[in-house]
Image (cartoon, helix red, strand yellow):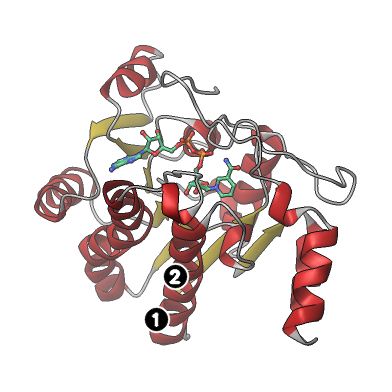
Amino acid sequence: MTETSVQKRVLITGGASGIGRLLAVRFADAGWPVIVWDINKGLLDTLEAEGNTLITPMLCDITDREEVYKKADEVQKTFGALDILINNAGIVSGKPLLQTSDAEIEATIQVNLLSLFWVTKAFLPAMVSRKSGHLVTIASAAGLVGVKGLVDYSATKFAAVGFNESLRMEYGGREAGIATTVVCPFFIDTGMFRGVKTRFPLLLPIMQPEYVADKIVRAVKRKKKILILPFFVRTLFILRLFPLSFFDRVAGFFGINRSMDQFTGRKGGETVK
Ligand code: NAD
C-alpha cells in the first residue's frame, strides 16, 4: 500500500479560507477525512454547503484554550486520534509597530503563537501514545527574516519556527515517531497580504495559493521537515553568515523593507477557493 493510499485523519486550523481551505479540499480529494476549525461561521457554512462528506467544518476559536480542549475531545471521541495536525490559522495587522494597537498585537500573538500551544497540546498526547502522528506548522518567510511593517507578525512567525524545531527535537526521534513539517512561504495571493509588492518577481514571486497548497500537500505526504517557498528564500541561510550590516543592505536591495508599503490586507472577509 502506498503512503497516499492509507487514509489519514487531518485537522486544519483556519481551514475555511485561503491556504487552509485549499489543503482541506486536496486532502479530502485524496480520500482523507478532514476536520476544519475556523472562527468564521459564514465561511464554514459555505464549506459545509459544498457537501464534501469527507470535510467536517467546526466552529472553534483557537485562541480560547478551554474551547480548544473541549472541541479536541469531541473530535477525538468521534474520529479517533489525528494522524496530521496542521496549525495553519493566522492573522496580520501589517502596520509599523507604533501604529499597531495593543489589542492588535495581542490578537496576533494569540492566534499565530499561543494557539499553537493549545491546539498541539490537545492532540499530541494521543499521537504520542500511538507513536504516530504528524505536526505541520504553517509559519512564513517572515519567520526567517524580519520585515518592516510586520514586527508583531514576524515575531510570532520566528516563534512558530522555534516551536516546530523544538518539538522536532522532543518528539521527532525514531522512538517517539512524530513527524514535523514547518512551512515558510513568501507572500501568497490569498488576500491576507493584499497590496504587498515584490521588487524581483522572478526570484521572489507573489505565489498563487494553488501552487503553494500543492507544494504543502506533497511535503506533508513525503514528511519533509521543512518547506521554504520560493527556493530563493533559502539564500537567507547563506546571508546570515555575513555581518548584519551587509545582511540588512542585501535585504534592502531585494525590496524586503518596501514590500509592505502598499499593504491593504483583506477587506470584507473575501476568500479564495
Ligand atoms: P487566510 O486569512 O485566508 O486564512 C486564515 C484563516 O484563519 C481564516 O479562515 C480565519 O478565519 C482563520 N482564523 C483567524 N483567527 C482564527 C481563530 N482565532 N480561530 C480559528 N481560526 C481563525 O490566510 P492565508 O493566507 O490562507 O494564511 C494561512 C497561513 O499561512 C497563516 O498562518 C499565514 O500567516 C501563513 N502565511 C500566509 C502568507 C500569505 O501571503 N498569505 C505568507 C506566508 C505565510
Q: Residue 235 carries which label?
A: none
The residues tagged by marks 2 and 1 sit, at their Cα atoms, a distance apart of 18 Å
> In terms of image quadrants, where is residue 40?
top left
Residue density around tag 2, few if under 14, some if 14–19, many if 20 or more, within 10 Å: some
Q: Which mark is residue 171?
A: 1
Q: Where is residue 188 in the image (x, y as percent from the top left)?
A: 65, 40
Indicate the quadrant containing the N terminus: top left, top right, bottom left or bottom right.
Answer: bottom right
Q: Residue, x 29% and y 74% (percent of image)?
A: 128
Q: Position of residue 135 (x, y in %)?
A: 42, 63
Q: Residue, x 36% and y 23% (percent of image)?
A: 53
Residue 1 visible in the picture = no
Assign a secondary structure to mark 2. helix
Q: What residue type is labelled 2?
A: Ala
Q: Nearer the viewer, residue 241 or 233?
A: 241
Q: What residue type is labelled 1?
A: Tyr
Q: Nearer the viewer, residue 95 or 216?
A: 95
Q: Does the residue labelled 1 lie within 8 Å of ligand 1?
A: no
> In terms of image quadrants, where is residue 213?
top right
Residue 116 higher or lower than 211, as above or below? below
Left/right placement of residue 225 relative to residue 153 reads: right
Please give the residue where the numbered disc 2 appears in the rendered image.
Answer: 159
Assign a secondary structure to mark 1. helix
Residue 81 higher or lower than 44, as above or below? below
Q: Residue, x 79% and y 53% (percent of image)?
A: 255
Left/right placement of residue 94 relative to residue 195 reads: left
Indicate the quadrant containing the C terminus: top left, top right, bottom left or bottom right.
Answer: top right
Residue 242 higher or lower than 181, as above or below? below
Q: Which numbered disc, 2 or 1, marks the residue that appears first in the sequence?
A: 2
Residue 63 higher or lower than 231, as above or below? above
